[in-house]
C-alpha cells in the first residue's frame, strides 16, 4: 500500500472514534454512532476530506425520545429524524454506504493502528467514544474505557505509555486510577475531543491534593530526574512530599551507589549522572589556579582565605580525585568528568 494523503492527528482520532463506536463488522458501509453532535460533525468533516466524499451520499439519522425537532447543518447531507423511546438523550448515526470507500477507510485504519506515533491520537478518539469519568467516596477518581472484553489494541497503547489499568469484568471497562496515571493521561490530552468529558476531566484532575504513588515509583523517577542536579527541597516540591520523606529515599540510594551527593556552600545537590561532578565557584577557581604545583599557603593567598579553609577545600577536591598532594605540593589530576559549577 502506497502513502496515504491527509493522514494527520484528526484522522487518527477518527480512527479511535470509529473503533470505539463504529460498526466494524459490515462490509458495505461506514457508520459512526454518538450522542455528541460535535463529535459527529468532527467525524463527518474529517472523513469527507480524507476519503473525498460527496456529502449527498452521507446519511445522518437523529433519534430522540419525543418529536421535538433538531435542526442540523451538514451541507448536502441527508438528515432524517426518528423516535426512540429508550433515548434519554438524543443520539446520531452517521452512515455512508460504499463498499469501495469502506475498503479504503479500513486500509487507513490498518496503517494508523500499526504506527506507534499515532497511539495518543487513537486513544483520544477511543476515549471520546467509549470513555467516562467516575468519582466516589474517599476521593476515588477513575478514568474508564468501556469494553465488553479486553481489546488488544488498547492494551498495547496503555502499555506503550506505561499507563497501568485494570480490566473490570463487572464494570465491563478498563479502570485507570492513581495520580501518576492521570498525569500521563493529562499529558496526552485524552479528553480533548469531547467537550463535556474534557471539562469534567480537568475539574477532577485539579482536585488532586496529593500524589498517591505506587510502590517504588518515586525511587524510579528520581534516577531520571537527577540527570541534572537538584536539591532535596526541589525534589520534595516535585513529588509533593516532605523533605524528610525524600531524604529517606535519597540516602539509601546514595549508599547503593545509584546517586551522588555534592555540597556547595551550605546547599546539598543530588545527581545520578556519574560522569559529572558539582563544584562551588571557589573549588573551581582552585582547579583553574593549579596550572602548576602549588603550596597550600599559595592557594590560600590567591583566594584571600586562611590556610585552614584552603586546606579543607583541597581535601574535598582530593576526595573527588581532582587533585593530589605530593611533598607538600598540590597537583591537578586530569579527569574525564564534566565539572558543573554552582
Image (cartoon, rainbow, N blue to C red):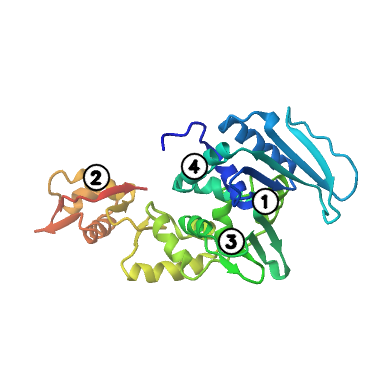
Q: Residue at x 58, y 63 (%)?
A: 211
Q: In front: mark 2 or mark 1?
A: 1
Viewer-side residue, 147 vs 240: 147
- Tell me the tag on residue 318: none
Circle 4 is placed at which residue position? 107
Tell me which label, 3 or 4, sits earlier in the chain. 4
- Tell me the tag on residue 302: 2
Tell me which label, 2 or 3, sits earlier in the chain. 3
In-image side of 110 versus 200 (left or right): left
Instruction: Pinpoint residue 11: horizontal percent, then vertical percent.
Output: 56, 39
The quarter of the displayed image where residue 2 is located:
top left
The crowding category of the residue bearing disc 4, from other C-alpha atoms within 10 Å (few below 14, some 14 to 19, many at least 20), is: few
Circle 1 is placed at which residue position? 202
Instruction: Pinpoint residue 68: horizontal percent, then vertical percent.
Output: 90, 43
Q: In front: mark 2 or mark 4?
A: 4
Label 4, secondary structure: give it.
Answer: helix
Tell me which label, 2 or 4, sits earlier in the chain. 4
In-image side of 213 versus 322 (left or right): right
Viewer-side residue, 229 vs 88: 88
Amino acid at each position: 500500500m502506497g502513502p496515504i494523503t491527509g493522514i494527520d492527528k484528526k484522522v487518527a482520532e477518527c480512527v479511535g472514534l470509529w473503533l470505539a463506536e463504529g460498526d466494524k463488522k459490515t462490509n458495505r458501509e461506514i457508520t459512526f454512532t454518538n450522542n455528541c453532535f460535535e463529535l459527529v460533525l468532527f467525524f463527518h468533516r474529517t472523513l469527507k476530506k480524507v476519503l473525498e466524499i460527496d456529502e449527498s451520499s452521507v446519511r445522518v439519522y437523529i433519534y430522540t425520545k419525543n418529536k421535538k425537532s433538531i435542526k442540523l447543518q451538514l451541507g448536502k447531507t441527508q438528515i432524517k429524524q426518528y423516535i426512540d423511546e429508550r433515548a434519554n438523550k438524543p443520539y446520531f448515526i452517521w452512515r455512508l454506504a460504499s463498499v469501495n470507500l469502506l475498503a479504503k477507510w479500513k486500509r487507513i485504519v490498518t496503517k494508523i493502528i500499526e504506527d506507534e506515533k499515532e497511539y495518543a491520537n487513537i486513544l483520544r478518539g477511543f476515549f471520546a467514544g467509549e470513555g467516562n469519568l467516575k468519582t466516589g467516596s474517599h476521593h476515588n477518581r477513575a478514568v474508564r474505557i468501556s469494553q465488553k472484553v479486553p481489546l488488544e489494541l488498547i492494551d498495547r497503547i496503555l502499555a506503550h505509555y506505561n499507563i497501568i489499568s485494570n480490566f473490570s469484568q463487572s464494570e465491563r471497562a478498563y479502570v485507570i486510577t492513581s495520580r501518576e496515571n492521570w498525569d500521563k493521561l493529562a499529558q496526552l490530552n485524552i479528553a480533548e475531543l469531547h467537550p463535556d468529558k474534557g471539562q469534567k476531566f480537568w475539574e477532577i484532575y485539579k482536585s488532586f491534593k496529593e500524589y498517591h504513588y505506587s510502590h517504588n515509583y518515586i525511587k524510579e523517577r528520581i534516577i531520571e530526574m537527577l540527570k541534572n542536579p537538584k536539591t532535596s527541597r526541589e525534589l520534595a516540591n516535585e513529588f509533593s512530599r516532605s523533605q524528610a520523606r525524600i531524604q529517606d529515599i535519597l540516602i539509601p540510594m546514595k549508599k547503593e551507589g545509584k546517586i551522588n551527593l555534592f555540597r556547595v556552600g551550605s546547599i546539598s545537590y543530588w545527581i545520578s549522572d556519574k560522569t559529572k561532578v558539582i563544584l562551588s565557584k571557589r573549588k573551581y577557581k582552585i582547579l583553574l589556579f593549579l596550572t602548576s604545583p602549588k603550596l597550600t599557603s599559595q592557594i590560600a593567598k590567591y583566594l584571600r582565605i586562611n590556610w585552614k579553609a584552603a586546606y579543607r577545600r583541597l581535601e574535598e577536591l582530593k576526595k573527588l580525585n581532582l587533585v593530589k598532594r605530593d611533598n607538600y605540593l598540590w597537583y591537578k589530576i586530569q579527569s574525564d568528568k564534566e565539572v558543573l559549577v554552582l
